[in-house]
Image (cartoon, rainbow, N blue to C red):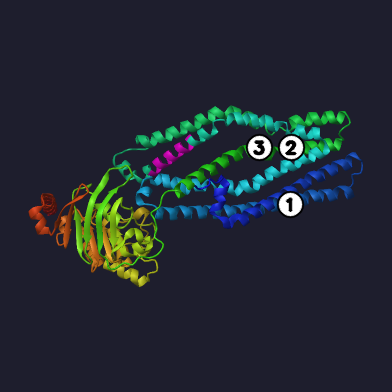
Amino acid sequence: MKKKRGTFGAVFSYAAECKGKLALAVILAILSVGCGVLPYIAVYKIINLFFESQASMQTVMPWVGVCAAGYTAQRILFSFATYSSHMAAYNILEHIRNLLTEKLVRMPLGTVMGKTAGEWKSTIVDRVESMELPLAHMIPEGISNLVLPVFVIAYLFSINWKIALAAMICVPVGAAVYAMMMKNFNSQYENYMKSSNYVNSVMVEYTEGIEVIKAFNQSSSSYKKYSSAVEDFKNYTLDWYKSTWGLMNLGGAILPSTLLGVLPAGVLLYVSGGFTPAELTLAVILSLSIVAPVSWFTTAVNQFKQVQYAVRDVETVLSLPELPQAEKEAEIKGSEVQLKNVHFAYTEDGEKVLHGINLTLPQKKFTALVGPSGGGKSTVAKLIARFWDVNEGTITVGGADIRNIPLKQLSQQISYVAQDNFLFNCSLFENIRIGKPDATDEEVMEAAKAAQCEEFISRLPQGWETPAGEAGGKLSGGERQRIAIARAILKNAPIVVLDEATAFTDPENEAQLQKSITELTAGKTLLVIAHRLSTIQNADKIVVLEKGEIVAEGGHSELLERSPIYKNMWNAHIGARAWQAGTQGKEQRADV
């Protein structure tokens, strides 16, 4: 069983190489505290000189120099301490984010898609970012604010134990008030984080769905889910604040009030002859010096909680199950794909979507998968690409079980093109190069030409350097698909899976897209999932899938004769094409 780590132990384990920077920050912070005490000692010496009538330019100025030197050294050392801690903090954040993104790649697709984009953004961006301020400041400031009060109290004990206790009296009283305030802190903070996560997720959903919201005239106030989430978050935050503000202000008033104990105790000691005027003055000054450090710890509690919850969310993600990874490359003979008695459900207790699928994709042949929506066609495609692992049965590529093929090696064997491929917000040229990162510019150009991309790219103001926009939003559906196909052509994998690759294509782009698909699939083992049956009627084999089971397979003419499902789908497709042709004819006549 894995031993549970402390909050900062977990953080530091993510970036062991930063321990040197953090250790340096601690050492510099301690030295800065030592230098920061020098001005207090110098002031005491100067005051003592005046009380003893020995003050002069020659006797006072050296101590003034000590004050200036101590303060200057304190600020310089503390600056370097915070610089070192900031460098360590940013390195730790970088490392944690890299761990999270690498984890996403190794997890089953269903696990990743089980969370919304807002939830992932909350963990990878917001939660991790919330560690920066505490990590960068809690280390040097925490050390300083801990060491200084300890030093001051120890020094006061060396002068007089009574005055030392008087300086500390506000601490237990103030701590008791804060303890009352924080008795429900953990549960309240937990609910606060849940509310924050939810409103974050809804905000991302709102921005991603802004096109629909605008189309249906749903403003932020009328879009109830968004407005309710924001309102609930505001109300919870305010209610929490109202329930604690009284005790918080009382504790904030008591905790820094060191003079409430030191001043009366010091005066009594002076009157009784136990204190000199210089010692009384020094005791008052030193007691004031611990006000800021003691107050700092009240804010540090919230910062610590931020780190604690961030670490919890990060650890939760990093502990999620991964797809088992083979350690050494498998021997792959050819590009035939076989599914043998494959059963699959998206969750352990969920309903099965595939029931005993037995399917062979012959090497360098064209296999089409058709059927009613929800029948499991896309699930088959994604299982071949190993986005998930099957519950029962096996899938083999070139005779090797894909579970025994390292993901990198399997990826080299399969090009997967979906109906809505994601484009990154970088140049179109770089979006294509993703298919083969080490490709030359000439290879990228050739792939783009084969995918019929040159025609529309040449019309763009920035040409190849045109940014694709957020998720490829600056391009039409057909243009995005041709970029995705160019990416797959550049990859040049022996197996090609097209999952509804022409689903969103308009008639004007369909001919160009078909040309690019022809270039992509030449000489490859090809699986096509399509709802436009005209695009697959020349397939070597057509497989009909319904409710997770294969109900028929064969050629186009054969299935028209003996498969009612396929015949109905074909008739519906022909009818839709006839309607579309008729509509276009009317539009043309109207134009005339």
Label 1 with label 3: CB-CB less than 8 Å: no
Q: Earlier in the sequence, mark 1 or mark 3?
A: 1
Say which element carries label 1: helix
Q: Main secondary structure of the magenta part?
A: helix
Query: Up-down: is 275 above or below 147?
Result: above
Extreme residue toward the left, this view: 561
Label at residue 450: none
Q: Earlier in the sequence, mark 2 or mark 3?
A: 2
Q: Quadrant of the C terminus?
A: bottom left
Which residue is disc 3 drawn over?
Answer: 295
Tell me what residue is drawn at x 57 percent, y 47 percent: 8
Tell me what residue is drawn at x 46 percent, y 33 percent: 234
Label 2 with label 3: CB-CB less than 8 Å: no
Alpha carbon of mark 1 to alpha carbon of mark 3: how far? 24 Å
The answer to whether 206 appears left or right of 588 in the picture is right
Label at residue 72: 1
The boundaries of the magenta stretch are 191-204
Expressed as whole percent of the image width and height from the top left, the position of residue 268 reads: 83, 28
- Residue 238 visible to the viewer: yes
Label at residue 288: 2
Query: Up-down: is 204 above or below 411?
Result: above
Amino acid type for the residue under numbered disc 3 = Ser
Pick the front one: 227 or 287: 287
Q: Is residue 427 magenta?
A: no
